[in-house]
């Protein structure tokens, strides 16, 4: 066994490290035998030297094996999940999971909180009164079996080494290391006991991977490591050069997701991404043989109302209101100030700084500047315009939902430079590429 410092030295110098040494080092991270300083040195060494494919697979499996792996005996369908690398107005999980469950899959979705300018599924769900994002294992298992889906946060029992490594990456400028991202995502997904996984890799100014080539590299690494670790996987690279939903903010996004599931509003970009990801899930899970068949099944689940019914049942099983989907406005409350921001001139929406939109939500109180900040789930933006939209002077660009007048004006000031009105511009594509 290599001493931690010798293991770090080997990685720092670009030498290959063996599976046994990697596993022992990761076990030391989970047990506390490896210090924070040594974890930080390791993540920096990986940041500069990278990792071979064999090393990435070994690191991922070692991180998975520091905790428990879920099992799903006696189900009559495949166990599937999706993961998004994060964005603004990204309500895909809330829409996709019940739709795929309505097609015969089981979705034990382990989600995260908002990070930086991006929103988190757990924060959105916590805007629902009573919803338990940390159900017991028994309740989580029962909810999946009875409704086809459940949503929870990562417990200390699943890939615990990941939690410690990530907290240190966050303060050592190594969050963007692709091998470490791959191991972090896949160690948790492998611990879910899945039959297949689909990934939504965001690219553009509102994503962590701004450049398309970096998104391609991440997608390729994730798919290959997942497959080598025994988990069938596909990835889509999707656009995050504008908010995906027409709302940004926790309660507002849940409200929009419910309305989409009920067919009350349309969002073509979001539907294209959901259908694309859902199609890959059904194909990998053996629920459909051809893409056209899968898309037909997903569309039927939307239009029949079964998907929204499953979402409502999941919410009720996890402690939320029994009639949320029937009366979301009774539970998803707006703040005191809800006023539109008007276009200062006529033209076309040429560019949206999506990262700035995300930080505007944080400034309103709908996200965290610090890990222990309390979120105001009611604040945010709605009726967001899209790139390519034509607009007249005095038209509504969006509505700001704020706790007070001072917050409204500060948000408006931030948004003035985030939305550029200029020349005629084509609408942005929703899906760029597929991997796997």
Image (cartoon, grey):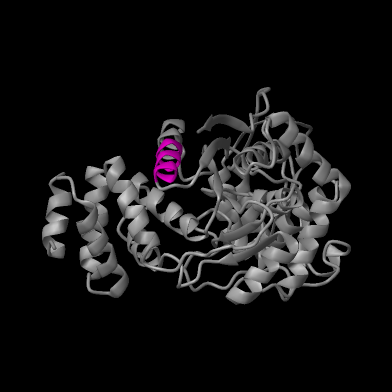
Above-or-below relation of 426 to 59:
above
Above-or-below relation of 281 to 134:
above
Q: Quadrant of residue 282?
A: top right
From the top left corner, tell me how far across and down residue 29 is, in percent: 28, 68
Drawn side of residue 35 relative to residue 217, left or right: left
The secondary structure that dominates the magenta segment is helix
Drawn side of residue 50 relative to residue 70, left or right: left
Residue at 37%, 48% in the rendered image: 176
Q: Nearer the viewer, residue 49 or 136?
A: 136
Q: Nearer the viewer, residue 255 or 77?
A: 77
Drawn side of residue 62 relative to residue 379, left or right: left
Q: Nearer the viewer, residue 168 or 303?
A: 303
Above-or-below relation of 25 to 264:
below
- Counting labels gives 0
Q: Quadrant of residue 329?
A: bottom right
From the top left corner, tell me how far across and down residue 123 is, in percent: 61, 64
Q: Farthest residue in the front direction?
A: 74
Q: Nearer the viewer, residue 411 or 188?
A: 188
Magenta stretch: includes residue 226: yes
Q: Quadrant of residue 377?
A: bottom right
Residue at 76%, 59% in the rendered image: 311
The quarter of the image holding the N terminus is bottom left
Residue at 68%, 22% in the rendered image: 424
Q: Which residues are magenta?
A: 219-228
From the top left corner, tell me how far across and down residue 43 is, in percent: 27, 55
From the top left corner, tell me how far across and down residue 187 is, in percent: 42, 56
> Is residue 415 among the parts visible in the rendering?
yes
Residue at 68%, 28% in the rendered image: 427
Magenta stretch: includes residue 415: no
Drawn side of residue 124 relative to residue 213, left or right: right
């Amino acid at each position: 066994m290599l001493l931690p410092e010798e293991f770090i030295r080997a990685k720092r110098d670009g030498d290959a490290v063996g599976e046994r040494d990697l596993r022992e080092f990761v076990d030391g991270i989970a047990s506390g035998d490896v210090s924070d300083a040594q974890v930080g040195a390791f993540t920096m060494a990986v940041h500069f030297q990278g990792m071979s494919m064999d090393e990435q697979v070994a690191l991922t499996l070692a991180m998975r094996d520091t905790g428990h792996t879920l099992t799903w005996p006696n189900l009559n369908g495949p166990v599937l999940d999706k993961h998004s690398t994060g964005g603004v107005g990204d309500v895909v999980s809330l829409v996709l999971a019940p739709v795929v469950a309505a097609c015969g899959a089981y979705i034990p979705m382990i989600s995260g909180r908002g990070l930086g300018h991006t929103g988190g599924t757990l924060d959105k769900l916590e805007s629902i009164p009573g919803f338990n994002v940390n159900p017991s294992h028994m309740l989580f298992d029962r909810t999946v079996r009875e409704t086809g889906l459940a949503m929870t946060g990562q417990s200390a029992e699943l890939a615990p080494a990941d939690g410690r490594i990530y907290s240190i990456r966050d303060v050592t400028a190594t969050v963007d290391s692709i091998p470490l991202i791959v191991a972090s995502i896949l160690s948790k997904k492998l611990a879910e006991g899945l039959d297949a996984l689909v990934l939504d890799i965001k690219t553009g100014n509102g994503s962590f991977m701004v450049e398309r080539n970096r998104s391609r590299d991440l997608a390729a690494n994730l798919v290959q490591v997942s497959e080598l670790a025994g988990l069938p996987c596909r990835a889509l690279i999707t656009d995050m050069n504008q908010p995906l939903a027409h709302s940004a903010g926790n309660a507002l996004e849940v409200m929009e997701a419910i309305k989409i599931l009920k067919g009350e509003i349309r969002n073509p970009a979001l539907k294209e991404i959901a259908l694309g990801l859902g199609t890959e899930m059904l194909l990998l899970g053996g629920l459909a043989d051809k893409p056209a068949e899968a898309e037909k099944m997903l569309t039927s689940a939307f239009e029949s109302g079964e998907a929204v019914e499953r979402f409502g049942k999941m919410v009720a099983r996890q402690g939320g209101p029994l009639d949320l989907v029937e009366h979301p406005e009774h539970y998803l409350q707006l703040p005191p100030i809800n006023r539109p921001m008007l276009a200062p001139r006529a033209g076309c929406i040429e560019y949206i700084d999506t990262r700035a939109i995300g930080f505007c939500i944080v400034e309103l109180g709908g996200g965290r500047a610090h890990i222990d900040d309390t979120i105001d789930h009611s604040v945010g933006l709605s009726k967001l315009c899209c790139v390519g939209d034509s607009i007249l002077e005095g038209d509504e660009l969006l509505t700001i939902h704020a706790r007070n007048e001072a917050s409204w004006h500060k948000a408006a000031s931030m948004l003035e430079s985030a939305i550029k009105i200029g020349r005629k511009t084509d609408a942005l594509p929703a899906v760029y590429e597929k991997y796997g």
